Amino acid sequence: MVAERGWWVLLSYRVPREPSTPRIAVWRRLRQLGVAQLGDGLVALPEDARTRELLEWVAGDVEAAGGEAVLWRAQALAGADERAVARTMADARAVEYRGLAEAASSALAGPAEEATRALRRLRRELQAVRRRDFFPPPEREAATQALDALARAVADGARTAGSRA
């Protein structure tokens, strides 16, 4: 979890309702980044050079769409509040990791050709989830193990098919 009273980067933003395309693009980008939604138009990420830069880019997109954006560097006044935000972020990633583990298990039970395609897709998805995983939950390891098992099965299937040829 986050160290008590760590620094956060906050983005306060407002995007015009019309046209809706820029507003949706900002929302999708924030979701990809794994932000904590603190309120309507207020999101946060643990502060480091990467997260600061990412939110600066989003702020630029908001302003380019005719909206308003302000970046803040902040600390929670209470450690419990900070832990609650971190827990919310970890819970969101846990849901994603469980989905990846379930998809890997399903692919393992399916045809070999589909398992190979699924493995490539799931590896990309795992990488994307890890990029937005600031407070790794236990489900991260379970998802990694499920993908490793799928990779072993795909490799074994390829070796078996190669030995038959």
Image (cartoon, rainbow, N blue to C red):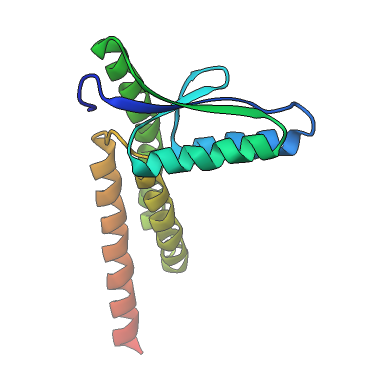
Q: Is 135 left, or right, of 34 in this rendering?
A: left
Q: Is 145 left, or right, of 124 in this rendering?
A: left
Residue 16, quarter of the rendered image: top right
Residue 27, quarter of the rendered image: top right
User: Which residue is farthest left?
Assistant: 3
Residue 120, quarter of the rendered image: bottom left
In terms of depth relative to the viewer, which is nearer, 92 or 27?
A: 27
In terms of depth relative to the viewer, which is nearer, 140 or 157?
A: 140
Classify 126 as above or below 58.
below
Residue 47: x and y in percent read: 34, 33
> What residue sits 68% from the left and 29% below the top?
67
User: Which residue is farthest right?
Assistant: 18
In terms of depth relative to the viewer, which is nearer, 105 or 60?
A: 60
Classify 22 as above or below 113.
above
Picture quarter with the C terminus? bottom left
Residue 96: x and y in percent read: 40, 38
Classify 14 as above or below 58.
above
> What residue sits 68% from the left and 33% below the top?
23
Picture quarter with the N terminus? top left
- Can residue 102 be seen at all in this image of the molecule? no
Classify 79 as above or below 46.
above
Q: Is 36 left, or right, of 63 in this rendering?
A: left
> What residue sits 72% from the left and 33% below the top?
66
